[in-house]
């Protein structure tokens, strides 16, 4: 399961490293650059609930195998993206299919791991699991840097041997494949998929369509309405995709809010740090990988600390402390970005990673521990849907902020060196992915322009980090008020997860 899930973790960071090269080679648009990351996140969040349900009904081992095969195939096709006019559509579609494969795989894999340990041992077990997969995540920036130097396509092909290893180990270990056959809520799956897709689409494209456009407003409004209809349906239908009654458990619901806020900045972070390191700091892809790796120094240590705190006294102390540390860390990190000094940022990078590491594993584990043993796959589907939808919204919102702020910064700063507004806008649209302008001024004036671009992009990224710091502060305040004290009970009754329709049916 570590190899299976670790493959998806590696993919998240390895792709971010290659974004500048992808942008240049495939001539991606400013929003297209972000869709390469967000198509994966959106598909993952939109189909994760279905993946969790399928893990329970069809068997976790079967779903892990299907998910690994789907993910690896889509990875190969991403690497085969042709340098043609339809390149952007091609890679975005297969990145979305990668997300679907991951959604089939991850809830089933986590359900197998969780089901192998007693409640009081799960915190340590998952801390080890997330620690190892976190370490594999940290390989992504390093591997991405070196592979990108050869060919950016190799960052997708590297998933294939990892997938083969995962499939061999699954066949060898023969993990349990318990099934609980039940109808699949197809209308519910369509509602949640459409709702998430449209709401994120409106936010992501707002920098292109404009906030006053009927496309932007319509996408967000219709998407939100579909999500409301999804919730109403799940509360009434006899066999829901997600049995939302579990949200009446205060600990479960509060931990999911924490995970949503944390994820708003966690995954998008890798996109912004990679592009900042390569454009503003002028680092190679390999060194950009090392820059991101610094974050995992604090994250990996804190994941172990948080897991031990969870097992001893519950998740609250780790989550509250982690939120405060992350908020301060991101604020100081954002404040130092415009200095263009890697060494000066290092303490704040480690501090930010430590804060997020203290929150992620304890919060995720505590939420799942609130579910009955018969529905770990489904509970995992809920928590991961929340996490990945938070990440997808974060990528859309923060990406829009970056594009808008970068245009404003460049218009002002390039105007100071005699570059017209129209040219400044064109340059801004070219550098959003960190690849630098194409066909810009040369000579001494070109050097001035590039220096302006470096500083403007750093200032824009700084704004994004301040927003992330604000989100972490909100997470801290929320956890301080709403996350309950104490550990999860040793056993949760199955009826804690039932919908009213199911309870009525059993009574009858």
Image (cartoon, helix red, strand yellow):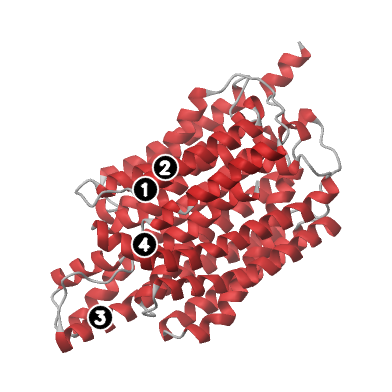
> Quick one: label 1 or label 4, which is nearer the N terminus?
4
Residue 78: mark? 1
Quote the CA–CA distance across marks 2 and 4. 18 Å
Which mark sits nearer the N-terminus, 2 or 4?
A: 4
Q: Residue at x 54, y 34 (%)?
A: 66
Of the residues tagged 4 and 3, which is closer to the observer? 4
Q: Is residue 471 above or below residue 291?
A: above
Q: Position of residue 83 (x, y in %)?
A: 23, 52
Give 108 or 416, whichever is nearer the viewer: 108
Q: Residues within 10 Å of mark 2 (few under 14, many from 20)?
A: many
Q: Quadrant of residue 146?
A: bottom left
Q: Which residue is mark 2?
A: 74
Q: CA distance from mark 2 to mark 1?
A: 6 Å
* Residue sitting at x 69%, y 25%: 179
The residue beneath circle 4 is: 19
Mark 4 secondary-structure assignment = helix
Looking at this view, is 322 or 476 the one in front?
A: 322
Q: Which residue is mark 3?
A: 450
Q: How far, Cα to Cα, is label 3 from label 2?
A: 36 Å
Q: Are marks 4 and 3 in contact (CB under 8 Å)?
A: no
**How far, Cα to Cα, is label 4 from label 3?**
19 Å
User: Is residue 92 or residue 153 the one in the foreground?
Assistant: 153
Mark 2 or mark 4: which is in front? Answer: 2
Give the mark, 4 or 3, whose residue is nearer the N terminus. 4
Q: Are marks 2 and 1 in contact (CB under 8 Å)?
A: yes
Q: Residue at x 61, y 27 (%)?
A: 235
Q: Is residue 438 left or right of residue 224?
A: left
Please indicate, yes or no, whether residue 43 appears anywhere in the rendered image: no
* Res 115 seen here: yes
Circle 3 Cα neighbour tier, 10 Å, few/some/many (<14 / 14–19 / ≥20): many
């Amino acid at each position: 399961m570590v190899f299976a899930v670790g493959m998806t973790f590696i993919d998240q960071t390895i792709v971010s490293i290659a974004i500048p090269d992808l942008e240049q080679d495939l001539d991606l648009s400013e929003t297209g650059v972000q869709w390469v990351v967000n198509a994966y996140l959106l598909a993952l969040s939109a189909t994760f609930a279905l993946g969790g349900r399928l893990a329970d009904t069809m068997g976790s081992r079967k779903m892990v195998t299907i998910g690994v095969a789907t993910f690896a195939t889509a990875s190969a096709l991403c690497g085969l993206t042709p340098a043609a006019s339809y390149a952007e559509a091609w890679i975005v579609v297969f990145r979305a299919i990668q997300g679907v494969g991951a959604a089939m795989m991850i809830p089933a894999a986590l359900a197998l791991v969780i089901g192998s340990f007693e409640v009081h041992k799960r915190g340590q077990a998952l801390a080890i699991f997330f620690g190892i997969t976190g370490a594999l995540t940290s390989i992504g920036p390093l591997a991405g840097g070196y592979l990108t130097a050869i060919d950016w396509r190799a960052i997708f092909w590297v998933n294939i041997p990892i997938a083969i290893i995962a499939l061999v180990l699954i066949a060898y270990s023969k993990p349990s494949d318990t099934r609980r056959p039940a109808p699949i809520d197809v209308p519910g799956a369509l509602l949640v998929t459409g709702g998430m897709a449209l709401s994120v689409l409106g936010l992501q494209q707002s920098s292109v369509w404009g906030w006053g456009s009927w496309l932007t407003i319509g996408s967000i409004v219709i998407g939100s309405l579909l999500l409301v209809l999804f919730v109403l349906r799940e509360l009434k239908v006899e066999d829901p995709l997600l049995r939302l009654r579990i949200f009446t458990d205060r600990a479960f619901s509060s931990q999911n809010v924490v995970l949503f806020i944390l994820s708003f900045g966690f995954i998008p972070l890798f996109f912004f740090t990679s592009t900042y390191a390569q454009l503003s700091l002028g680092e190679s892809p390999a060194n950009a990988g090392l820059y991101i790796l610094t974050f995992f120094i604090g994250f990996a240590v804190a994941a172990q600390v948080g897991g031990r705190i969870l097992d001893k006294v519950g998740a609250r102390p780790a989550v509250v402390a982690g939120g405060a540390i992350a908020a301060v860390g991101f604020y100081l990190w954002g404040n130092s970005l415009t200095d263009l000094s890697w060494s000066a940022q290092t303490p704040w990078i480690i501090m930010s990673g430590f804060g997020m590491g203290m929150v992620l594993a304890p919060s995720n584990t505590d939420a799942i521990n609130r579910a009955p043993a018969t529905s770990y796959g489904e509970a995992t589907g809920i928590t991961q849907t929340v996490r990945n939808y938070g990440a997808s919204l974060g990528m859309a919102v923060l990406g829009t902020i970056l594009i808008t702020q970068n245009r404003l910064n460049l218009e002002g700063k390039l105007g100071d060196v005699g570059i017209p507004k129209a040219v400044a806008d064109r340059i801004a649209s070219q550098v959003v992915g960190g690849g630098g302008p194409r066909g810009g001024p040369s000579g001494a004036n070109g050097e001035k322009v590039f220096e302006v671009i470096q500083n403007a992009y750093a200032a824009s990224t700084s704004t994004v980090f301040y927003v992330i710091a604000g989100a972490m502060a909100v997470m801290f305040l929320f956890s301080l008020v709403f996350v309950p004290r104490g550990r999860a009970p040793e056993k949760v009754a199955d009826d804690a997860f039932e919908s009213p329709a199911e309870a009525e049916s059993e009574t009858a």
